[in-house]
């Protein structure tokens, strides 16, 4: 056990367990909002990264990652707003509407920003975050809260010279929109806000499924929808396109999706999003991540690799240890995404996991 792990286990973990997940998350986001603006904070975080994270160049989905871990979408996504005017006004005042945009890449390496939708979203109200320490699991029904693509693009464009070398943008289909042509038009408009301002991430990910909104995720992962939206996105950008799916997809659907991905030029599949399950109160469905997602996510990643050996698979779901990372890579994944690991292993989780990958 390293000094960092010992300090996290003895000091931070007991403190976190005394607070509910939503309170901790809010405090972390507010701390990041301030830390992004501190002149020495990103430099210090970068030093930690260089000290703890080995240089392991990893090709995946047309991108060369610095190492085989990516911070999954959902963490560096920004504030929610009621409308676009309000979001743009916040950008104009200099407010940090995407907390973590500067610090998290310095701590972790590659980060997938978003999800961003065409229009701002306030997300769901009330209790939206839970943590299960016994199973090292998280659960959320945040509901795609984000500032909207136009405001996010304006914010990042004003900081273009400080953006990371390797990063991605996750674009989600607008919840509540059912017309295929409107879905494609809004998705392309969202992407266009970034490209028009000269913001070129290393990749774009199309999020076909989100269990934390009013949408039924099962109706949003068809091969027809993947072809329609995926082809439009591939044709609109000059960087690789990845597509994110949910766990529990049937074999025939995986085959159909993999065929669609190959036909339209999708470079990688992110497997998977969270797993929709009842909240602890049983009042709604919320997305489970971490330990309770591990088995279903790994099974889906393995299924895609078995069906489409040429398709790059990025494992996502319950990767909390070096052993989990090794297992995902052995199943055929080229890289992996983490999120809940930050909750249970702290801000230097990427370095800890990579340090464990060679042993138990």
Image (cartoon, helix red, strand yellow):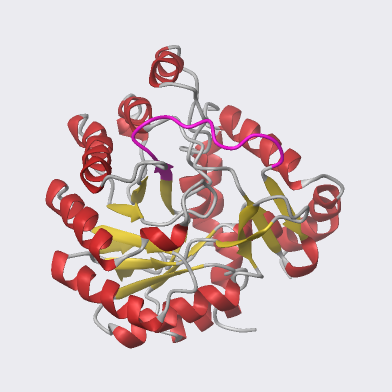
Residue found at the far front of this picture = 179
Of residue 55 and residue 293, the one placed in the foreground of this image is 293
Within the magenta stretch, is there residue 211? Answer: no
User: What span is colored magenta in the figure?
Assistant: 114-127
Dividing the picture into quadrants, the one containing residue 143 is top right
Across and down, in percent, residue 267 comes to 24, 66
Q: Residue at x 55, y 36 (%)?
A: 123
Q: Residue at x 15, y 50 (%)?
A: 238
- Residue 337 appears in the picture as rendered: yes
Within the magenta stretch, is there residue 120? Answer: yes
Of residue 336 and residue 108, the one placed in the foreground of this image is 336
Across and down, in percent, residue 280 comes to 76, 56
Q: Residue at x 52, y 31 (%)?
A: 36
Across and down, in percent, residue 46 comes to 50, 47
Of residue 187 and residue 167, the one placed in the foreground of this image is 187
Describe residue 94's horizontal placement relative to residue 61 as left or right.
right
Across and down, in percent, residue 216 comes to 47, 55
Q: Main secondary structure of the magenta part?
A: loop
Describe residue 71's horizontal placement relative to residue 281 as left or right.
left
- Residue 346 appears in the picture as rendered: no
Q: Quadrant of the N terminus?
A: bottom right
Describe residue 119's horizontal placement relative to residue 357 as left or right.
left
Residue 254, above or below 182: below
Q: Quadrant of the C terminus?
A: bottom right
Q: Residue at x 49, y 81 (%)?
A: 299
Of residue 68 and residue 219, the one placed in the foreground of this image is 219
Residue 113, above or below 342: above
Label tally: 0
Dividing the picture into quadrants, the one containing residue 61 is bottom left
């Amino acid at each position: 056990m390293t000094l960092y792990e010992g300090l996290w286990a003895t000091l931070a973990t007991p403190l976190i367990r005394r607070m509910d997940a939503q309170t901790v998350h809010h405090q972390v986001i507010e701390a990041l909002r301030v830390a992004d603006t501190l002149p020495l904070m990103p430099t210090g975080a970068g030093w930690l990264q260089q000290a703890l994270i080995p240089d392991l160049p990893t090709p995946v989905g047309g991108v060369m990652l610095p190492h085989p871990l990516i911070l999954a979408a959902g963490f560096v996504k920004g504030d929610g707003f009621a409308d676009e005017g309000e979001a743009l006004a916040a950008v104009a005042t200099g407010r940090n509407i995407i907390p973590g945009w500067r610090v998290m890449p310095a701590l972790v390496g590659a980060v997938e920003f978003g999800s961003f939708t065409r229009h701002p979203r306030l997300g769901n109200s009330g209790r939206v975050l839970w943590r299960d320490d016994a199973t090292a699991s998280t659960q959320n029904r945040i509901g795609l809260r984000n500032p909207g693509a136009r405001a996010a693009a304006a914010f990042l464009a004003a900081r273009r010279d400080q953006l990371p070398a390797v990063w991605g943008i996750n674009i989600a289909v607008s919840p509540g929109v059912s017309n295929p042509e409107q879905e494609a038009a809004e998705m392309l408009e969202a992407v266009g806000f970034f490209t028009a301002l000269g913001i070129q991430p290393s990749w774009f990910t199309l999020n076909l499924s989100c269990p934390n909104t009013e949408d039924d995720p099962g109706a949003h992962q068809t091969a027809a929808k993947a072809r329609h939206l995926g082809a439009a996105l591939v044709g609109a950008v000059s960087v690789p396109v990845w597509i994110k799916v949910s766990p529990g997809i049937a074999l025939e659907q995986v085959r159909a999706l993999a065929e669609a991905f190959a036909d339209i030029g999708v470079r990688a599949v992110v497997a998977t999003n969270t797993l929709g399950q009842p909240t602890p109160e049983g009042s709604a469905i919320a997305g489970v991540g971490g330990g309770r997602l591990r088995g279903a996510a790994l099974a889906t990643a393995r299924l895609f690799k078995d069906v489409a050996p040429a398709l790059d698979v990025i494992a996502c779901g319950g990767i909390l240890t070096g052993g989990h990372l090794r297992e995902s890579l052995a199943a055929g994944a080229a890289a992996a995404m983490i999120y809940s690991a930050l909750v249970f292993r702290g801000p230097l989780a990427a370095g800890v996991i990579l340090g464990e990958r060679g042993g138990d």
